[in-house]
Amino acid sequence: MAEISLLDISQDNKPIKLNLSRIISSGTIILYIWSLPYLAKIGFAEKGSTSISEFVSNAHATGAMAVLSFTPLTLMWEYQDIRVVTVCTEKGKRVLYYTLVAYQWFYGGFLVCTVNYVPLWLHMLMVVSFCISFVIHSIMTMNYTKPSKCGQYQLIVGILSCVCMPFSKGLWFWVCECVGLSMIMLFTPTEILLNY
């Protein structure tokens, strides 16, 4: 299995490495969310949906989203732990830790509180909190870690897609969600590939 050495930081004389297959597997969640209308046609996701929440509002579609999200979310933690050690102040380390915790907690809340199984207010609270925590974490990431230009563009596009969602109707809402989530999931692998 091919590995990419991120930094020359040793823990017990072992460099920290990330497996290349884990970086590539971050793309599977992106393929999944963009395939949801097709998956609805074949009965895997919910038919007649206009948002990721609606498409994944059954056990198997939600489970698939959770499983496919695992690797990119874990990669975010690993990369942040390594990156923060080398570039951040103590304040930056704390801010990025808590904004990533909030982002992942509300992402989990979004998966747990699916649109058809909890009161709408609870689902909306999780979705809005997830979007806000993504925007805050992205801004703090750009502020404290100085990502590559490509990484900055990805975060900005992700933020803009979140801003556009309240003004989007029908499948355009789903498109905004997919663009935003794609940017979230692409950011870490892109930064690793461009910088290390």
Image: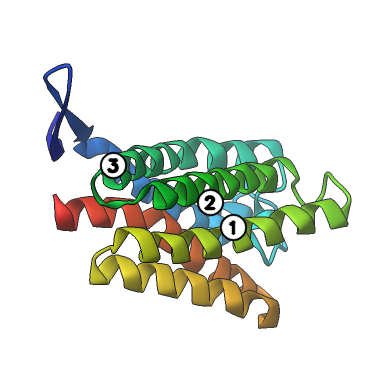
Left or right placement of residue 35 versus residue 84 in this view: right
Confirm whether residue 169 shows in the render. Answer: no
Q: How crowded is mark 2: few (under 14 residues within 10 Å), some or many (20 or more)?
A: many
Judging depth in this view, the residue of 91 and 196 nearest the camera is 91
At numbered mark 1, what does the secondary structure look like: helix, strand or loop?
A: helix
Q: In which quarter of the image is residue 151?
A: bottom left
Which of the two discs, 2 and 1, labels the residue nearer the N terminus?
Answer: 2
**Of labels 3 and 2, the one closer to you:** 3
Tell me how far mark 3 sits from mark 1, CA to CA.
22 Å
Residue 92, position in %: x, y?
A: 41, 52
Which of the two discs, 3 and 1, labels the residue nearer the N terminus?
Answer: 3
Judging depth in this view, the residue of 32 and 114 nearest the camera is 114
The residue that disc 1 covers is 133
**Of labels 2 and 1, the one closer to you:** 2
Could you say which disc has been placed on residue 99 in the image?
2
Please, what is the three-letter code of the amino acid marked with disc 3? Val
Could you say which disc has been placed on residue 85 in the image?
3
Q: Tell me whether the residue at label 2 lies in contact with that at label 1, contact meaning CB atoms closer than 8 angstroms.
A: yes
Residue 33, position in %: x, y?
A: 51, 56
Please, what is the three-letter code of the amino acid marked with disc 2? Thr
Q: Quadrant of residue 111?
A: top right
Residue occupying the far front of the picture: 90
At numbered mark 3, what does the secondary structure look like: helix, strand or loop?
A: helix
Q: In the image, what residue occupies the spot 44% across and 42% down?
A: 73
Which of the two discs, 3 and 2, labels the residue nearer the N terminus?
Answer: 3
Residue 17, position in %: x, y?
A: 19, 32
Left or right placement of residue 25 versus residue 182 in this view: left
Q: In the image, what residue occupies the spot 61% across and 62% down?
A: 131
